[in-house]
Amino acid sequence: MTFLTVSELNKEYPNVHVLDKICFEIQRGEFVSVFGPNGCGKTTLLNILSGMDNSYTGSVKFTDNSIRKAFIFQNSNDSILPWKNVLDNLRLDNQNIDESRIKDVLDELKLSNFKNRFPYQLSGGMKQLLAIARSFVFECDIIFLDEPFSSLDYNMAQTVREKFLGLWQKDKPTIFFVSHDIKETILLSDKIILLSKRPAKIKKIIEIELPRPRDSTILTSKKFLEYEKMILYEVENENKIED
Ligand SMILES: Nc1ncnc2c1ncn2[C@@H]1O[C@H](COP(=O)(O)OP(=O)(O)O)[C@@H](O)[C@H]1O
Ligand SMILES: [Mg+2]
């Protein structure tokens, strides 16, 4: 079922043309990533789709009018409350919170032993997991993530990605994920929207038909490497044209 339709989306700042006639659809429950070079307009696109930026031309239409959105940024300090412990960061003063839901999410992320800790007592990876936990506790329809693992070291990023995937697999909220890491986008996504340099146009939309559930063992599979090669080819091809 179609969840979101974007057509002829155009975005300009004074003197900077950022998005150029972007068109795509997202299905409910689909894991969609946007991949493109730094500065091409990925965050701009996320801000428009999520409703944080209303100055654009073209159309962005959600099939359903009342949808619950969650955001996860590169740095979870932007959303986590430092004076609340893990549990209270998940409850967020909501009196009707489903405590069993919190427990399930914490168990799935293996965070239960840390529920009474405060954010300053958590590693960067755990703080990202806490931000992820919150979006699942509140059962959002769509989660927007903007390069959420890019400040973590390789191993931590991989661990957090796998836990996130495990949790996503259970309820399958729709995901809009911004990345500039090729392996990450292939591992996670159902669909990758490849953007060109600015002004960003859609270069290609790639359906990733790798079996789920997925974990890092898939990174060396033949099919995975073929997708990686295809994307690298697209990226390098663009650089050649620009040279
Ligand atoms: N508020 C703004 N005013 C003017 N230009 C902006 C503003 N925000 C972003 N830009 C420009 O828009 C382009 C795309 O930015 P962004 O969406 O953040 O790229 P990405 O997330 O792909 O790295 C960049 O050239 C950036 O400098
Ligand atoms: Mg960005």
Image (tube, rainbow, N blue to C red):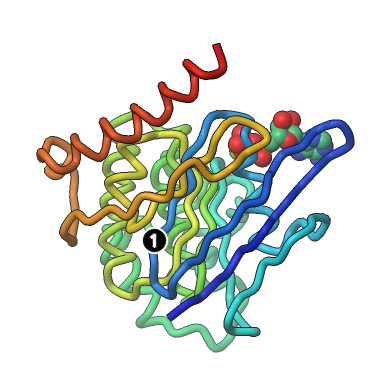
Residue visible at 41% across and 53% down in the picture = 129
Residue 206, percent from left and from top: 36, 50
Image quarter for residue 69? Answer: bottom right
Q: Position of residue 54 (x, y in %)?
A: 80, 60
Looking at the figure, which quarter contains the N terminus? bottom left
Looking at the image, is 123 positioned above or below residue 139?
above
Q: In the picture shown, does residue 128 fall above or below 136?
A: above
Residue at the spot x=18%, y=38% of the render? 219
Quarter where residue 51 is shown? bottom right
Residue plotted at (29% across, 57% down): 165
- Give the residue furthest to the right: 14
Q: Which residue is mark 1?
A: 31
| Foreground residue among 72 and 53 | 53
SS at circle 1? strand
Q: In this orientation, does residue 66 appear?
A: yes
Q: Is residue 47 left or right of residue 71?
A: right
